[in-house]
């Protein structure tokens, strides 16, 4: 693991979202578990749906990276590319572990 992977990612979020952001991030953690479980069962359609949802919701709360990762996961699921799905899921996990939310 290089030092860049440990650096915090600061995301500025509208203070109006302060009460819902912890739940939003927790849902993304749950998505990671669901994607990995779906990978074990070759459920690419289920993974595609999760990716599609992430693509739609991330940017609305200021988490453009979550939308981008969701887009990549959705595309990989459509093409049944488990290695790419796993890689992007790991990116999502790293992002969530490193994100620091600032309400301003």
Image (cartoon, grey):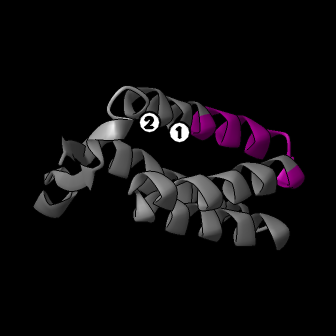
Front-lying residue, 25 or 93: 25
Question: Where residue 13 appears, x then y in whole percent?
Answer: 29, 49
The secondary element bearing badge 1 is classed as helix
Q: Which residue is mark 1?
A: 28
Instruction: Magenta stretch: give its range.
Output: 31-45
**Along the horizontal axis of the image, is 51 left or right of 43?**
left
Do labels 2 and 1 touch, CB within 8 Å? yes
Give the number of the disc on residue 25. Answer: 2
Q: Is 41 in the magenta?
A: yes
Q: Check the image and report above or below for 98 versus 60.
A: above
Question: Where residue 90 appears, x then y in whole percent?
Answer: 47, 52
**Along the horizontal axis of the image, is 72 left or right of 81?**
left
Front-lying residue, 41 or 75: 75
Q: Is 56 in the magenta?
A: no
**Along the horizontal axis of the image, is 96 left or right of 83?**
left
Front-lying residue, 93 or 39: 93
- Inter-mark Cα distance, 2 to 1: 5 Å
Q: Residue at horizontal 53%, vertical 63%?
A: 67
Question: Where residue 21 appears, x then y in whole percent?
Answer: 39, 34
Most common secondary structure along the magenta stretch: helix
Q: Report the number of discs.
A: 2
Q: Residue at horizontal 63%, vertical 69%?
A: 71
Crowding at dot 2, Cα within 10 Å, few <14 / some 14-19 / many 20+, comes out as some
Q: Residue at horizontal 57%, vertical 40%?
A: 32
């Amino acid at each position: 693991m290089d030092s860049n992977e440990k650096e915090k990612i600061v995301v500025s979020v509208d203070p109006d979202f302060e009460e819902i952001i912890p739940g939003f991030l927790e849902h993304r953690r749950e998505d990671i578990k669901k994607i990995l479980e779906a990978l074990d069962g070759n459920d690419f359609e289920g993974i595609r749906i999760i990716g599609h949802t992430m693509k739609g919701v991330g940017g609305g709360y200021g988490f453009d990276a979550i939308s981008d990762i969701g887009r990549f996961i959705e595309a990989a699921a459509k093409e049944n590319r488990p290695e790419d799905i796993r890689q992007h899921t790991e990116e999502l996990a790293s992002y969530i572990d490193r994100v620091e939310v600032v309400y301003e």
